[in-house]
Structure formats: structure tokens, C-alpha cells
Amino acid sequence: MPADAEQLEGQQRFGAAEWGLRVDLAAAYRLVALFGWDDLVFTHISARLPGQHDQFLINPYGMMFEEITASSLVKVDMQGNKLDDSPYPVNPAGFTIHSAVHAARADAGCVLHTHTLNGVAVSAQRGGVLPLSQQSIFVLSSLGYHDYEGVALREDEKPRLVADLGAKNYLMLRNHGLLTLGASVADAFLAMYLFESVCAIQLRAQSGGGELVQVNPAIIGGAQQQAAQVTKGLGGALAWPGLLRRLDRRLPGYAS
């Protein structure tokens, strides 16, 4: 089916606003696969539905990230009930984490969680993220930590996870992985790109064996203002169109 016809069909089925969100979220799943951040089927990205406080989209549990399409995403409510006829279930751990963040943070339009080797390795270090790179100042200016409590299946973990996140946009899940949130899919993705880069740089710097030079803590305090300047106030939206073009070249088919 031609792309224009798929877009029209999707808009008719889900409405224009929801379809646009579905396309962006499916693209994020494909990009996570393209960047090598996926963990088979075991991590998750969610996006709050436009105009809804208690509904979000998440991956069909069992599909590889490079297979996910806009129409295959599963709509759920805050109790974990599926609101469409998807044949796929929802990852219970994914629901616990994402429902907690979406319920607590009205600004969490998208929540992205990974189990990358770099992220898990740094999450296991007592010192966590160190100020070793330019990228690290943006993460450190809005970073929380949540101690590992086992696979995230229990409702009683939610308040502790939310408290550890607070008003921050980056959360390191100790011995587990990385989590970012943003007002949009593009914002959450850019945040994860930075978070993952910070962890990879840190591990490489540590493996060199030499004395490490840390960034002056005073610089971290102005990182958010600098980030706004660098992205021209657009945040993730500055890079998102280019990322979609890359995806269209390398892993098309998400907008179906």
C-alpha cells in the first residue's frame, strides 16, 4: 500500500493525533533496534495518548523492535487493561514501570527504558554516572537513581520508583538499565541517546587505565540552559526528522 494510503487509513482508524503518535513511537522502537539498544523483546517504550491522562501505547510483547509498526502498538489503561483487539499481551514489568511514571508525571509524554550493556554496566558501579564528558553534564543535571528490587512486577515498588525519579528526566535503575522521559517521543529518544553515550564513554575512559579528568561541578548547573541553546529550544525535535530519514533508508515500514 502506498505511504499516503497507509497514512489515510491509519488516521481514519485511530484519528490523526493518535496516528501521528503511533508513527513516532513505532519509529522509536525501530531506531532503538537500529542503534543496537534493544534486548530482544524485553524492554519497552510508551507514549501517552493525546488528551488522555490514563491511556498510553506500548509494544506488543513478543514482537521484535524492528518489526513494530504504528498499527501494531497496544493501547492500555492505567490498570493494564488492553483497550484494543491486539493479539499480543503487554510486558507486565513494562506496564509496572511505565504506568507508574505516566501516572506521576503529567509531562511524561514518552517513557523509554533500555537494558543496554553499557547502561547496565554503569548502573552496577557504585559511583554511577561520572562527570567525564560533555554529554555527561546534560544527564547529571537531571539524574536520579533507583535501587534494584528484582523484576519490576510489584505495585508497591511504584511509589519508591516515582520518588527516586522526582522531577528528573533521567533515571538509572541500579543493576538493571536506563530510563528517560520527555514531553514527546523525540525528546525521550534524544535523552536516551545522550544517556547511552555517556555510559559508553565512561566505560571506555575507565578501561584506558589512566587518571581521569572530571568536569567542574559548576558547569553542570548551567547544562539545561546550554542544552536549550544548542538545540535552538527544539529539544529532540531538532534531530527527529533526520532520524526518520535515516530510518526510511535503513528500516522502513514502521508507518503502517
Image: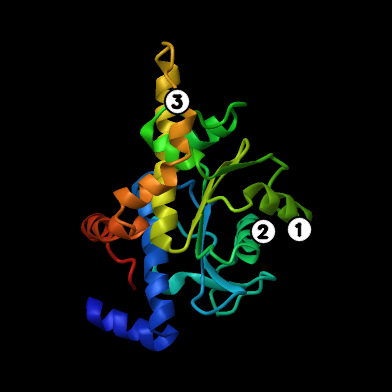
**Secondary structure type for disc 3:** helix
- Mark 2 or mark 1, which has the lower sequence index? 2
Q: Residue 117 appears at what percent x and percent y?
A: 48, 35
Q: Quadrant of the N terminus?
A: bottom left
- Scheme by which the image is coloured: rainbow
- Distance CA(mark 2)–CA(mark 3): 30 Å
The disc label shown at residue 155, or none:
1
| Whether residue 234 is visible | yes
Q: Amino acid at mark 3?
A: Leu
- Disc 2 marks which residue? 96
- Quadrant for residue 15, please give it: bottom left
10 Å neighbourhood of mark 3: few (<14), some, or many (≥20)? some
- Mark 2 or mark 3, which has the lower sequence index? 2
**Secondary structure type for disc 2:** helix
- Disc 3 marks which residue? 203
Q: Amino acid at mark 1?
A: Glu
Q: Is residue 87 above or below residue 217?
A: below
Q: Amino acid at mark 2?
A: Thr
**Viewed as shown, does residue 243 lie left or right of 216?**
left
